[in-house]
Image (cartoon, rainbow, N blue to C red):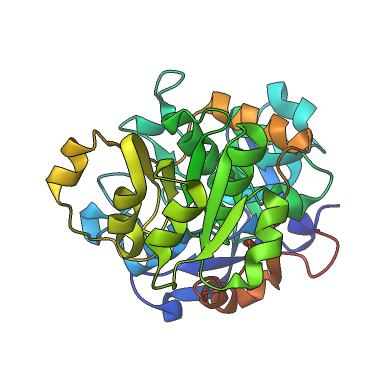
């Protein structure tokens, strides 16, 4: 008998009770959700942490009706968490009973958008923001958005869904060509480390990886970086241009303001800049002359399409992309995990495990 039935239909979940600090995260006992037609109940085995759920709690997307992925904003309390793997333990309708017992990774949002445009549909709704997510023992999700895990490990497979999809879509947007030089900011983080791998090992680029401390140099080179530089260097622009023998072809950015001006300066004429984050500042200044005189193309990016998710999962299954995990935390320590996530110097994903043992 599943633990959910043994416990009177109750489960542990960490909820965000409103906009604010870590004190807005509370461990609660709540009813196990019931899957409806077309949905399945997933026993969560691992849930990796992303910036998205922290920014949602902090109101970084705006508070009230301006926050979240939908115009109406986040409805509290909300269980966050979007990088989810687990086992299907209940189906809401007979046609999905073939999924029972399957080990799955969850595609992280719903949308009525046409194929190839799902991520920019007006009704795109994100798990952990518009729906209760994976900081819990169980979660319900549409059966057609549950994909086979690419790896045998739950925690390893949880390292890819949101950050990996974002990184894959970024690479597709800037249309990386073999032999090009791509600069990756925040290279030691969840999206950044995947940007390094995807740009180099899937698309064949030479990668300049920017990180804070050079203690990550060997790890980043193992992931595919050709050059690792510290963004703290006073000669960073010169070092980039010297190593590459001139300007770079493209930039994959997750930092924002702190490296924005530098990124545009080191781009070649006709270069491409793609950003999917702003951990180093959400508001920046832009000299438009740099943009038009250098013919720079700029992209804003988040998540991606179902087709790209399938491509990503296949690349992971084929061993082209490997999980990079920094640390595990039990579900009960979600506050400590989010606090640790914001520390500089971490290398890779932070993963919550609802079960004390056996999930990895």
Say whether residue 293 is visible.
yes
- Total numbered badges shown on the rendered structure: 0
Q: Is residue 22 above or below residue 10?
A: below
- State which quarter of the image contains the C terminus: bottom right
Residue 2: x and y in percent read 81, 53
Name the residue located 38 percent from the left edge and 42 percent from the top edge. 274
Looking at the image, residue 23 sits to the left or right of residue 203; the answer is: left
Q: Quadrant of residue 348?
A: bottom right
Above or below: residue 306 compared with residue 40 = above
Please identify the quarter of the rendering in which residue 124 is found.
top left
For this rendering, which residue is in front, 182 or 10? 182
Quarter-wise, where is residue 250 in the image?
top left
Q: Position of residue 148 (x, y in %)?
A: 74, 33
**As drawn, 201 above or below 239:** above
Residue visible at 62% across and 33% down?
204
In the shown orientation, is residue 200 left or right of residue 246?
right
Residue 55 or 17: which is nearer the viewer? 55
């Amino acid at each position: 008998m599943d633990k959910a039935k043994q416990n009177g239909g109750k489960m542990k979940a960490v909820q965000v009770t409103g906009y604010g600090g870590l004190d807005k995260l509370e461990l609660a006992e709540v009813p196990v959700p019931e899957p409806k037609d077309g949905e399945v109940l997933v026993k969560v085995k691992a849930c990796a942490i992303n910036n998205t759920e922290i920014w949602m709690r902090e109101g970084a997307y705006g508070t009230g009706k301006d926050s979240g992925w939908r115009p109406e904003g986040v409805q509290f309390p909300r269980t966050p968490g979007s990088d989810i793997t687990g086992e299907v333990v209940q189906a809401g309708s007979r046609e999905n009973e073939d999924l029972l017992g399957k080990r799955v990774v969850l595609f992280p949002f719903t949308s009525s958008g046409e194929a190839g445009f799902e991520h920019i549909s007006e009704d795109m709704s994100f798990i952990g923001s518009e729906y209760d997510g994976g900081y819990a023992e169980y979660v319900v999700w549409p059966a057609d958005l549950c994909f086979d895990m690419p790896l045998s490990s739950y925690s390893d497979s949880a390292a890819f869904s949101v950050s990996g999809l974002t990184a894959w879509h970024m690479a597709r947007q800037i249309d990386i060509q073999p032999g090009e030089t791509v600069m990756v900011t925040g290279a030691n983080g969840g999206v950044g480390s995947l940007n390094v791998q995807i740009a180099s090992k899937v698309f064949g680029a030479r990668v300049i990886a920017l990180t804070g401390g050079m203690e990550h140099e060997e790890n980043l080179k193992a992931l595919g970086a050709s050059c690792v530089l510290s963004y703290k260097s006073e000669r960073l622009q010169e070092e980039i241009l010297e190593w590459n023998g001139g300007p770079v072809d493209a930039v994959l950015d997750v930092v924002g303001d702190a490296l924005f001006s530098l990124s545009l300066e080191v781009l070649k004429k006709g270069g491409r800049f793609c950003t999917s984050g702003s951990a180093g500042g959400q508001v920046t200044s832009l000299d438009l002359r740099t943009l038009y005189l250098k013919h720079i193309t700029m992209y804003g990016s988040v998540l991606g399409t179902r087709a790209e998710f399938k491509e990503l999962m296949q690349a992971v299954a084929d061993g082209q992309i490997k999980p990079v995990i920094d640390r595990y935390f039990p579900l009960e320590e979600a506050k400590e995990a989010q606090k640790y996530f914001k520390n500089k110097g971490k290398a890779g994903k932070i993963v919550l495990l609802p079960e004390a043992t056996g999930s990895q």
